[in-house]
C-alpha cells in the first residue's frame, strides 16, 4: 500500500498565523513568528549539514567505483556488476543530496520572504504608518477592540495631528513618516519639565515599614495576580515572597496597580505620578526601593527572582528586567504582567515573560506599541465578552478589572496550547506550585513634594493670596485629616 501524502505537503514551508485557544489569542513564544523564523533557519542549517555528509558519501562511492576498475578483468561479470552497483548507489545518493539542497533553498527563500514582510511592517510602524491601507487589514467582519484602537491612535499621533490641522491625506502621511511613531517616554519626560507638572519628576522612594508572616501562597499566574490585588488594597505597599527554589533560593516581588487617596498627596509611589516614573524614567526610584526590600527580606546576590505586576505595577515589573543594578544582583527569571503598556520595554537576554491583555482594555495600548513577538515573550489577548458595570463602578473600563485578568490567567494555566504550557512551565520551574511561604509586605513612601519657592508678590502678609494658594496646593487633607 502506497504511503499517504500529508495534506498541504509539496509547497514551500510557511509561517503559521498566531493560534487561538478559545477566548485566548496567543502571540510570541514557541508558536510565535519570530521563533518560527529561527526554526526555519535551524532547519535549513540542518539540511546543509546533511547535504555536506551526502557529498562526502558521493565522493567515497566514486572512489570505491574507481578502485574496482583493476579487478574487472579478473572476473568480468562480477566485477562489472560491482562497478555498476556502486555507481548507481552513488547516483542515488546524488539525487537525494540534490533534493535536500533544493528543499534547503526553498526554506531559505521562505525565510527571506517572511523576513522582508516583517521588516517592511516594522519600518511602517517606526514611521507611524500602519493600518488596513498598508496591508494590515483585520479579519473579515472583525471589529477592532478598544486596546487596538488606542494603540493605533497613540502610535499614529503625528499623522493624526496633521489630519486634524487640515493637511491633505498625502501631506499628512509624509508628516507622520517624518515624525515617526509617538515616543510616549520622551513625551512624559518633556511634560515633567513643564510649569505645574514638575511633580511628575521622580523623587526618592524609601521603606517606612514592613510586616512578615507565613501564609499558604497560590503561585499560579492567577494566584499571583490576585495577590497583586490584595497588596493594592493598602496604599504604597509591595509584597516579597520567599520560596524554596531547590538548589537556589527564589523570590517573588508583587507590585500593585495605580492607587489614589489614602496617603498624603504625592507620597504614594504608585499614584498617577508613578505612571510617569515608570513610563518616562524606567522606574529608577521604585526599582531602588524594591532592591532594598529584597535585601531586607533576606535575598542574596545570585538568587532567582520573579516580578509580578498589574497595570502600573506591570510597567515597574518589566523595568526591573532591564535595570542593570537589579540584573547585576539577582537572577531575574520571569516577569508576569496584566493590563500593562510594556511594548517599549526590552528585557535582558534569557528573561521570560507572560503578558495578559484584554481587547477591550485600552490601558495596554496606551504606549502605542505592541509587545514584541519573541521566543521568550508571550502575549495573551483575552477576547471574552464583558459585562458593563454600573456607571459609578466603571473606573478604567470593564476590560481593565483585575479579577477579569485573574480568570484569564486561570484559563492559561488550564490550556493545552504548547506555547502557554511552555511559558507557565518556565514560571513553575522557579516558583513551584505553591504552599507555605514567608511573605513580607513593605510600605513604601515617595519623598514629599518640595515646597514652592516664595516670591515677594506672594508673601505680602499672612493672609496673602500666595500663602492661600500654597496651602491649597500642598496643604493638609480636608477637615483637618493629618497628612
Image (cartoon, grey):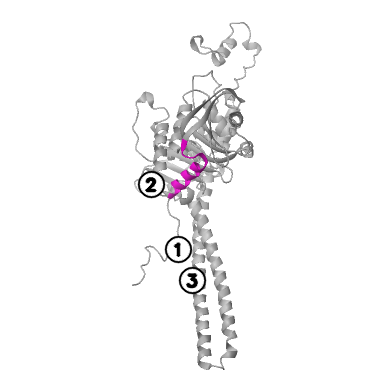
Residue 151 placement (x, y as % from top left): 47, 39
Mark before the other along the chain sequence, 2 or 3: 2
427 magenta-colored: yes
Q: Tell me if residue 333 can be seen.
A: yes
Mark nearest the camera among 2 and 1 is 2
Marks 2 and 3 in Cβ contact (< 8 Å): no
Q: Which residue is mark 3?
A: 99
Q: Which residue is mark 1?
A: 12
Residue 401 placement (x, y as % from top left): 41, 31
Quarter of the image containing the C terminus?
Answer: top right
Categorize mark 1 by other alpha carbons within 10 Å: few (<14), some (14-19), many (20+).
some
Placement of 52 over or under 133, stated as above or below: below
At horizontal 53% and vertical 89% (from top left) the residue drawn is 79
Mark before the other along the chain sequence, 3 or 1: 1
Horizontal arrangement in the rendering, residue 19 relative to residue 478 (left or right): left
- Secondary structure of the residue carrying numbered label 2: strand
At horizontal 49% and vertical 71% (from top left) the residue drawn is 99
Name the residue nearer the viewer: 90 or 385: 90
Rendered image: mark on residue 21: 2
Rendering quarter of residue 410? top left
95 magenta-colored: no
Amino acid at each position: 500500500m502506497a504511503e499517504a501524502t500529508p495534506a498541504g505537503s509539496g509547497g514551500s514551508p510557511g509561517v503559521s498565523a498566531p493560534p487561538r485557544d478559545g477566548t485566548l489569542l496567543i502571540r510570541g513564544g514557541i508558536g510565535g513568528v519570530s521563533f518560527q523564523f529561527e526554526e526555519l533557519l535551524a532547519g535549513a542549517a540542518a539540511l546543509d549539514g546533511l547535504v555536506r555528509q551526502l557529498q562526502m558519501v558521493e565522493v567515497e562511492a566514486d572512489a570505491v567505483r574507481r578502485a574496482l576498475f583493476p579487478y574487472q578483468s579478473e572476473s568480468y561479470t562480477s566485477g562489472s556488476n560491482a562497478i555498476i552497483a556502486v555507481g548507481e548507489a552513488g547516483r542515488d545518493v546524488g539525487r537525494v543530496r540534490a533534493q535536500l539542497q533544493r528543499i534547503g533553498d526553498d526554506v531559505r527563500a521562505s525565510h527571506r520572504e517572511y523576513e522582508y514582510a516583517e521588516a517592511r511592517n516594522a519600518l511602517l510602524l517606526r514611521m507611524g504608518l500602519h493600518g488596513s491601507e498598508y496591508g494590515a487589514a483585520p479579519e473579515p467582519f472583525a471589529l477592532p477592540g478598544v486596546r487596538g484602537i488606542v494603540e493605533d491612535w497613540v502610535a499614529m499621533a503625528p499623522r493624526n495631528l496633521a489630519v486634524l490641522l487640515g493637511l491633505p491625506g498625502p501631506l499628512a502621511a509624509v508628516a507622520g513618516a517624518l515624525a515617526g511613531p509617538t515616543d510616549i517616554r520622551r513625551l512624559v519626560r518633556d511634560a515633567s519639565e513643564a510649569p505645574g507638572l514638575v511633580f511628575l519628576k521622580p523623587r526618592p522612594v524609601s521603606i517606612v515599614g514592613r510586616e512578615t508572616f507565613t501564609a499558604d501562597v497560590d503561585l499560579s499566574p492567577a494566584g499571583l495576580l490576585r495577590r497583586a490585588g490584595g497588596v493594592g488594597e493598602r496604599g504604597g505597599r509591595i509584597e516579597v515572597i520567599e520560596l524554596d527554589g531547590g538548589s537556589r533560593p527564589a523570590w517573588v516581588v508583587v507590585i500593585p496597580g495605580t492607587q489614589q487617596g489614602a496617603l498624603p498627596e504625592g507620597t504614594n509611589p504608585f499614584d498617577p505620578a508613578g505612571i510617569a516614573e515608570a513610563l518616562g524614567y524606567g522606574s529608577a526610584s521604585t526599582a531602588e526601593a524594591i532592591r532594598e526590600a529584597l535585601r531586607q527580606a533576606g535575598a542574596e546576590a545570585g538568587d532567582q527572582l520573579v516580578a509580578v505586576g498589574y497595570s502600573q505595577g506591570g510597567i515597574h515589573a518589566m523595568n526591573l528586567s532591564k535595570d542593570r543594578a537589579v540584573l547585576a544582583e539577582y537572577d531575574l527569571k520571569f516577569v508576569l504582567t496584566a493590563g500593562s503598556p510594556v511594548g517599549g520595554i526590552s528585557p535582558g537576554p534569557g528573561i521570560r515573560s507572560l503578558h495578559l491583555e484584554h481587547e477591550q482594555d485600552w490601558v495596554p495600548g496606551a504606549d502605542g506599541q505592541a509587545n514584541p513577538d519573541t521566543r521568550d515573550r508571550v502575549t495573551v489577548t483575552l477576547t471574552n465578552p464583558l459585562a458593563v458595570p454600573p456607571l459609578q463602578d466603571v473606573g478604567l473600563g470593564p476590560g481593565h478589572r483585575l479579577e477579569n485578568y485573574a480568570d484569564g490567567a486561570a484559563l492559561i494555566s488550564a490550556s493545552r496550547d504548547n506555547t502557554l504550557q511552555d511559558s507557565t512551565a518556565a514560571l513553575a520551574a522557579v516558583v513551584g506550585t505553591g504552599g507555605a511561604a514567608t511573605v513580607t509586605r513593605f510600605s513604601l513612601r515617595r519623598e514629599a513634594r518640595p515646597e514652592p519657592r516664595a516670591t515677594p508678590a506672594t508673601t505680602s502678609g499672612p493672609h496673602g493670596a500666595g500663602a492661600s494658594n500654597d496651602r491649597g496646593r500642598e496643604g493638609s487633607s480636608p477637615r483637618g485629616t493629618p497628612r
